[in-house]
Amino acid sequence: MRFRPLCLLTVVLFASSLQLPTQAAQSEEDLRASLKKFTQVYEAVEGNFADKIDADQIYKGAIPAMLRTLDPHSNFFDPKANELFRENQQGRYFGVGMYIFAPEGKVIVSYPFINSPAWKAGLHPADSIIAVNDKDTEKLGVGDVSGMLKGPRGTPAQIVVKRLGEPTPLTFNIIRDQVPRDSVTDAYWYRPGVAFVKIDSFNENTSKELDQALTKLGESKMEGLILDLRDNPGGLVNEAVGVADHFLHKGQTIVTHHGRSSAETKFGAKHGERGPEYPIVVLVNGGSASAAEILTGALQDHDRAWVLGENTFGKGLVQAPFPLTGDSTLLLTIAKYYTPSGRLIQRDYEHQSFYEYYSRGEGHVNLKDAKKTDSGRIVYGGDGISPDEHYQVPKYTRLEAELLGRMVYFFYSPNFFADHKTAITREWQPTPEVLSDFKQFAEKRGMTIDQADWDRDKALISEHLREELLITAFSKEDSDRVHLDHDPEIQKAIDALPQSKALLEKAKAIIARQSHEPVAGIDR
């Protein structure tokens, strides 16, 4: 039998790693029959396929295909993906520190991270990478170039780029260093008494970063907090629990999970009340998922925060890692997450394709999963977390959407700086001449712009252009701050702080009343 030992080992590992109870496992006869079919298919492919087969590729393809029959989030990581997964969890890696992508087939710089080696060296958005350490990158993809840029701290990386306006390629000699990727990306006073904190994801340092950020701001002076979890895809659940612990009372439940072969596990606030109680408004949208939903659901169920925005994504499946041979990992769904009130976070995935699942449209209220908060408010689950107050993000006009979709702002930036050698300030605004030049640039890229549409959208186009140019002039982080300062949803959140304060006072009154209620059989 010409069955690859690697494939057989993988199947056996799966069977042994799952550790299913005897009564729920397949019978030995059924298992033998399934393995026999798999062997027969592999032998037919190996013996008769038109081209030479790559056993490793079949192995890598068979496992994800099997997992896709289970749920959208069970996953398999080969060694390369495993390494990236660990980096994301740790929130740091060693390299030069920049995002790269290939929107038109060539690997270019999206933007360098602030204070990273690449940022300090002077790399710019849209720089086209043509060589790394004397190796031509023209025919390489993003993954290959990214791997070349990473390396041990203190090692050199020579990067050669083409930049618009420069007659010859530019060479940057950079020393690799640790590149921290903070998960708490913004923490500042949005206005006197009201702080704004943005959590991008949940890695190993998130709860610590939050505590440090609030301490640095001076939490005792806070009259309100806007906690931005929009487009936060989640991450480490224990870090979401740690963040919730900062705001909740000791002993309050944060999240529970259980499954067919997984007993109920409860996570609660071990410390609690690590700061003064002030009203909180949490911002969420359809990109808020997993750990972000756990934090949101806990604060909402305990009436500790007012939730504003859109229905969250609805990813409430628990994945446990099962290490495999060759530094690979199986992430298998073993349970589902529930908020303190008992709401299911996970939305339906059994009655739609994975494409429909991931291209989630607008959420809806799931009347079948209605629960009550501590103060008795009705809240809904089973389709992510439903906000207390919905906020409809203004939709782009056709012209705005096309300018963004064609990346006209991004590709105009190097043209602008090639023609304008004078540095711009953070307060800089596009002049009529710059806007006219931008319009001509867009038309050269194949766009047909109606003058009436242009006049209608000119103010927003000007703001988008300003934010794009600030990335090159300063940093992506500076540009994001400017965007946040003009975000109407944040202003809506500030307006909602009184609702959050009312929730907080009501919950405190109920807790106080319950602590004084007589216990049955005891006369107080």
Image (cartoon, rainbow, N blue to C red):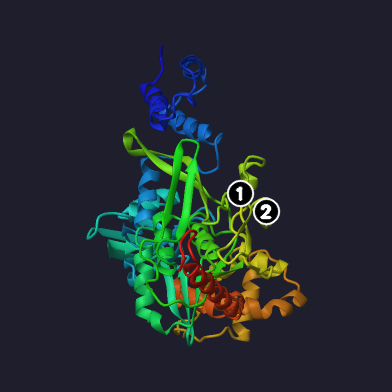
Q: Residues within 10 Å of mark 1 (few under 14, many from 20)?
A: many
Q: Residue at x 46, y 71 (%)?
A: 476
Q: Is residue 75 visible?
A: no
Q: Quadrant of residue 402?
A: bottom right
Question: Which image quadrant: the C terminus?
Answer: bottom left
Question: Exactly how many numbered labels are in the figure?
Answer: 2
Residue under numbered circle 2: 366
Describe the element under mark 2 as helix, strand or loop: loop
Q: Position of residue 246 (x, y in %)?
A: 40, 68
Q: Nearer the viewer, residue 215 or 372?
A: 372
Residue under numbered circle 1: 347
Tag 1 and tag 2, C-beta contact below 8 Å: yes
Question: Which image quadrant: the N terminus?
Answer: top left
Q: Position of residue 392 (x, y in %)?
A: 67, 68
Residue 234 sits above or below residue 497 on the image: above
Q: Residue at x 53, y 74 (%)?
A: 509
Q: Quadrant of residue 441?
A: bottom right
Name the N-terminal-most of marks 1 and 2: 1
Q: Is residue 148 visible?
A: yes
Q: Position of residue 387 (x, y in %)?
A: 62, 64
